[in-house]
Image (cartoon, rainbow, N blue to C red):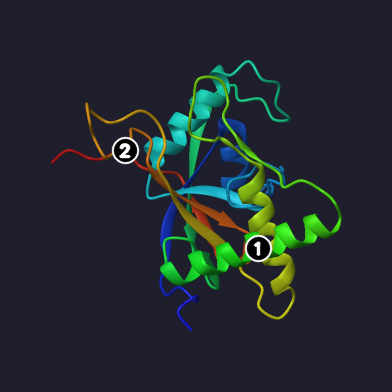
Amino acid sequence: MYSDRSGLILAFHGCDIKVRDNVIANKQQLKSSNNSYDWLGSGIYFWENSPARALDFTEELKASTKKRVQKIETPAVLGAIIDLKHCLDLTEFKNLQILKSGYDTLKEVLDTQGLELPENKDIGKSKDLLMRHLDCAVIETIHANNEPTNRYDSVRGIFVEGDPAYPKAGFKEKNHIQICVRNPNCIKGYFLPRELVKF
């Protein structure tokens, strides 16, 4: 009953400026990410209420030496107005129980097939488990079990990431809420984020 989210949210997608401008001009659509390590499963990813974090992430991609399908030449941010609709919101206690159940189901299926569970892994010096193979597989298992009668339109999760914000802090420098849109009809429109106007 409470999985349907009411109201619209503002979210931000980091990308190359050419992609941003083409989406704004309605010349292309954002593509769904379908990597086995995606934190919230397959879908179109956004940072909730954080254009600065979206830009920071895109700047990290540009600086990365890893080869990517889409090269970032000029980091940019695209704003979106999103209706989460039927959302697997992992900030809600009840949905964390669904997540645990998805893990149990995945483990049982893989055990039956004699296969190992995928693992979440660190990258480089980071201890934030940036490669979320296990989490992605669990969320995709939940989606597979819900199709087609109880299909989730979106997934929302909070992530604690980065170094402590200050010595002995309980907050990290890159904490954020991420949105994964599975149903593109949840995206009601795009906009160019404005700079704050001083008055």
Mark 2, Cα crowd under 10 Å, few <14 / some 14-19 / many 20+, is few
Label 2 residue SS: loop
Report the label total.
2
| Residue 34 higher or lower than 55, as above or below | below
Residue with the most extreme right position? 113
The residue at 22%/26% (across/down) is 167
Residue tagged 1: 104
- Quarter of the image with the C terminus is top left
- Which amino acid lies under the numbered mark 2 shown in the image of this protein? Glu
Q: Nearer the viewer, residue 105 or 136?
A: 105
Residue picked out by circle 2: 195
The vertical placement of 89 against 62, above or below, is below
Dot 1 lies on which element? helix
Residue under the point 48% across and 29% down? 127
- State the residue in front, 170 or 194: 170
Q: CA distance from mark 1 to mark 2?
A: 46 Å
Q: Is residue 94 above or below residue 130?
A: below
| Residue 56 quadrant | top left
Residue drawn at point x = 54 percent, y = 35 percent = 129
